[in-house]
């Protein structure tokens, strides 16, 4: 009696396993593109290998997607480690990968230490205030904010905030202007020369002007939005505006005339034509522009922060350069790598957004 | 005064030496409730002709009158099914039809509009695919969505630009039946461009044959007096069917390859219709 049920149970289990595998597979297929976009494409053959799918082919894929990039990185590190000590600067030899890694660790430790200090500060303050209240001296209760210098992670966050603000302003300005350019030949004719002239201007040239204007207009800065942050953001805006503007205009201008004719037959009013036809059809190109803009913005940000003394990564690099201790170069290299990796992640984020919003052009 | 009148309509593109006349002096009268088919070679200006009726392009000369009033521009009273479907690729089937319904029947309550959308999706047999994007549909399904969208505007005139040309023979036959049924059911005036002679005879009250471009005119108008409802099978058995078919084919053949046939030849083709039975629908009795 037991044997058949056992067989059935194991068959059921096998069926279940099969179903689970199939589910996993469909998830894998769906996320494949996203994984690839984030540089994690090598996970696909790994999972497929685990599922026992065409091992030979998957191993080849794995080699292509994981081994080759790793080889590139290793070769770079080796060349770096070999060449760096051979150049002597006024701050000592150029640091190799190990020193840079060590400084990254130091920066992390500094961050943790600073957080501990902050927590301790607030604890003491609360204790003191509690005692004062217990003693009935409530008028002497004081609540102060901790005023330690920002850690490396704080600086990363500041940089991200700055670029986000600049990017948002750029988007708010560029998309409507781009739509106007794409829709009307007059607007396009009027704006085109300005775009061509201002597009190549470097952030370093904008900064003094922006500084003067922001100082004049934004007289009493709030704590959440310091002047230096606003100056850096506006500089980012001025440099990152153009790709979005140009691509939006292109996207809007290249909308399929037949689709517009559908709108004309329906007698859609202008506003509905824009929201229902023009915007959705130009979304892929708008996102291409936004992605380029964010890349430009992030690149420009470091220079802007250096000059505006906004406490982000740019200021970190500048301060370390001025500081000139034996660890400075290694710390700057940590910053360079951080900037690169964050820039890459931002780009991938925009790419993922873009693919989520892009429809198939197949009608 | 006919329901729809084209008087001396001419249209050309380009300037100076570049200029090509597409339509030269087109006169056409369409009665209310009529099913009109336009046949002609590619590039003869069929789409241009229909676009002037739709109001999407203005003729250089001549006038287009609807109910005696000149057409100023495009409007939902003339629903168009474009040659290339022209569905919004980012909207679902329901979304595409909804766009038209919201615009034309915006005053109706939301529920009534929903029902209207559902009704037209149902009419073209796409209820199961209402939430799919155009890219997820077959060519024939997209075509049906385009037809449903045009019908959902409740137009007085339905303008169909080669609506079935991209379809295989089986789907094509099915949609021809649907178009005939919708035309009978909704009592609309239909102007349909087609490149299929049999399709024209199956559906049309009158067939308009365009001469070759440039400077195309209406070369011949053939009344199709065959009993309705028509089925493919009944047509093949009808004694006049081949005469109609022959007239259309002879006309097209005379113009084959951009030829400029002798007027006498064209007259000869026209007179073939004398071989037909004298009165329409006699065999039905
Ligand atoms: N916007 C335009 N600008 C210039 N020439 C045009 C334009 N639209 C159409 N034409 C020309 O007008 C002529 C007729 O075009 P039309 O699209 O009306 O032909 P058609 O009969 O619909 O052809 P088909 O059966 O291939 O659809 C063609 O020679 C074409 O090149
Ligand atoms: Mg055409």
Image: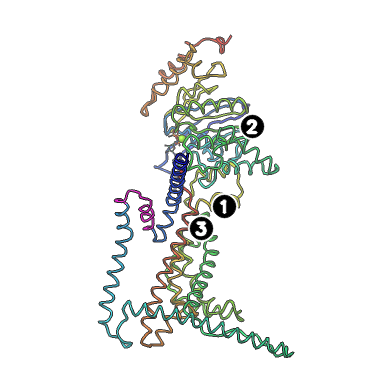
Report whether the residue tagged 1 is closer than 8 Å to ligand 1: no
Q: Quadrant of ligand 1?
A: top left
- The residue that mark 3 highlights is A181
Q: Chain of mark 2?
A: B
Q: CA distance from mark 3 to mark 1?
A: 13 Å
| Image vertical order of residue A333 relative to residue B125, above or below | below
* Chain for disc number 1: A
Magenta part, dominant SS: helix
Residue B73 visible in the current orientation:
no
Which one is in front, A336 or B204? Answer: A336
Label 1: which residue? A274
Q: Position of residue B270 (x, y in %)?
A: 46, 17
**Residue in the picture at 46% in, 69% down:** A297
Q: Reading the chain from its start, which is encountered first: label 3 or label 1?
A: 3
Q: Is residue A325 visible?
A: yes
> Which of the 4 image quadrants contains residue B66?
top right
Q: CA distance from mark 1 to mark 2?
A: 34 Å
Residue in view at x 62 percent, y 37 percent: B118
Task: Please state the extent of the stretch shown in magenta in the rendering.
Answer: A41-57
Q: Is residue A146 left or right of residue A236?
A: right
Report the mark closest to the observer, 3 or 1.
1
Q: In this view, which residue lies farthest toward the right?
A: A136
Query: What numbered label is drawn on residue B68?
Result: 2
Magenta region includes residue A42: yes
Q: Residue A124: say if magenta.
A: no
Asked if residue B234 lies left or right of residue A145, the reply is: left
Provide the secondary structure element on which disc 3 rests: helix
């Amino acid at each position: 009696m037991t044997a058949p049920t056992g067989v059935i149970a194991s068959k059921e289990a096998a069926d279940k396993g099969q179903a689970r595998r199939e589910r996993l597979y469909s998830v894998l297929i769906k996320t494949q593109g996203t994984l690839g976009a984030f540089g994690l494409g090598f996970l696909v053959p790994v999972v497929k290998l685990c599922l026992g799918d065409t091992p030979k082919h998957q191993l080849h894929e794995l080699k292509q997607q994981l081994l080759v990039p790793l080889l590139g990185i290793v070769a770079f590190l080796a060349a770096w480690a070999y060449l760096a000590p051979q150049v002597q600067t006024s701050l000592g030899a150029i640091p190799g990968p190990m020193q840079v890694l060590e400084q990254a660790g130091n920066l992390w430790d500094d961050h943790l230490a600073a957080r501990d200090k902050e927590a301790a500060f607030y604890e003491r303050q609360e204790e003191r205030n509690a005692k004062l209240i217990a003693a009935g001296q409530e008028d002497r209760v004081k609540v102060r904010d901790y005023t330690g210098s920002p850690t490396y992670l704080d600086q990363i966050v500041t940089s991200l905030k700055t670029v986000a603000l600049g990017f948002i302003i750029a988007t708010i300005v560029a998309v409507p202007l781009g739509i106007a350019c794409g829709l009307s030949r007059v607007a396009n004719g009027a704006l085109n020369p300005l775009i061509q002239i201002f597009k190549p201007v470097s952030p370093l040239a904008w900064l003094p002007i922006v500084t003067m204007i922001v100082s004049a207009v934004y007289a009493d800065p709030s704590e959440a939005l310091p002047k230096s942050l606003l100056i850096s953001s506006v500089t980012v805006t001025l440099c990152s505006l153009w790709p979005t503007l140009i691509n939006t205009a292109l996207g809007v201008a290249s909308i399929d005339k037949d689709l517009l004719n559908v709108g004309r037959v329906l007698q859609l009013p202008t506003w509905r034509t824009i929201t229902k036809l023009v915007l959705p059809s130009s979304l892929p190109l708008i996102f291409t522009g936004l992605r380029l803009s964010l890349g430009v913005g992030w690149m420009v940000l470091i220079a802007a922060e250096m000059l505006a003394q906004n406490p982000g990564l740019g200021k970190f690099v500048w301060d370390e350069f001025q500081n000139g201790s034996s660890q400075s170069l290694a710390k700057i290299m940590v910053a360079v790598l951080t900037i690169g990796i964050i820039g890459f992640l931002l780009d991938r984020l925009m790419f993922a957004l873009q693919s989520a919003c892009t429809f198939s052009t197949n009608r | 005064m006919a329901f729809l009148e084209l008087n001396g309509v001419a249209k050309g593109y380009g300037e100076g030496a570049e200029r090509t006349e597409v339509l030269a002096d087109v006169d056409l009268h369409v009665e209310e409730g009529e099913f009109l088919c336009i046949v002609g070679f590619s590039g003869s200006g069929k789409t241009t002709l229909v676009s002037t009726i739709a109001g999407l392009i203005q003729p250089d000369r001549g006038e287009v009158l609807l109910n005696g009033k000149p057409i100023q521009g495009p409007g939902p009273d003339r629903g168009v099914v474009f040659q290339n479907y022209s569905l919004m690729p980012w909207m679902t089937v329901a979304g595409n039809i909804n766009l038209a319904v919201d615009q034309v029947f915006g005053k109706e309550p939301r529920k009534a509009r929903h029902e209207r959308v559902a009704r037209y999706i149902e009419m073209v047999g796409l209820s199961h695919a209402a939430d799919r994007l155009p890219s997820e549909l077959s060519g024939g399904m997209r075509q049906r969505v385009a037809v449903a969208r045009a019908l959902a505007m409740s137009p007085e005139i339905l303008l169909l630009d080669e609506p079935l040309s991209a379809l295989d023979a089986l789907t094509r036959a099915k949609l021809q039946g649907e178009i005939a049924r919708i035309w009978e059911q909704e009592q609309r005036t239909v102007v349909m461009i087609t490149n299929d002679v049999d399709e024209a005879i199956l559906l049309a009250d009158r067939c308009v044959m365009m001469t070759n471009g440039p400077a195309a005119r209406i070369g011949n108008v053939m009344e199709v007096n065959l009993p309705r409802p028509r089925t493919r099978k009944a047509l093949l058995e009808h004694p006049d069917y081949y005469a109609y078919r022959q007239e259309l084919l002879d006309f097209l053949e005379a113009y084959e390859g951009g030829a400029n046939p002798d007027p006498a030849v064209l007259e000869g083709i026209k007179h073939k219709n004398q071989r037909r039975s004298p009165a329409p629908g006699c065999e039905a009795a």
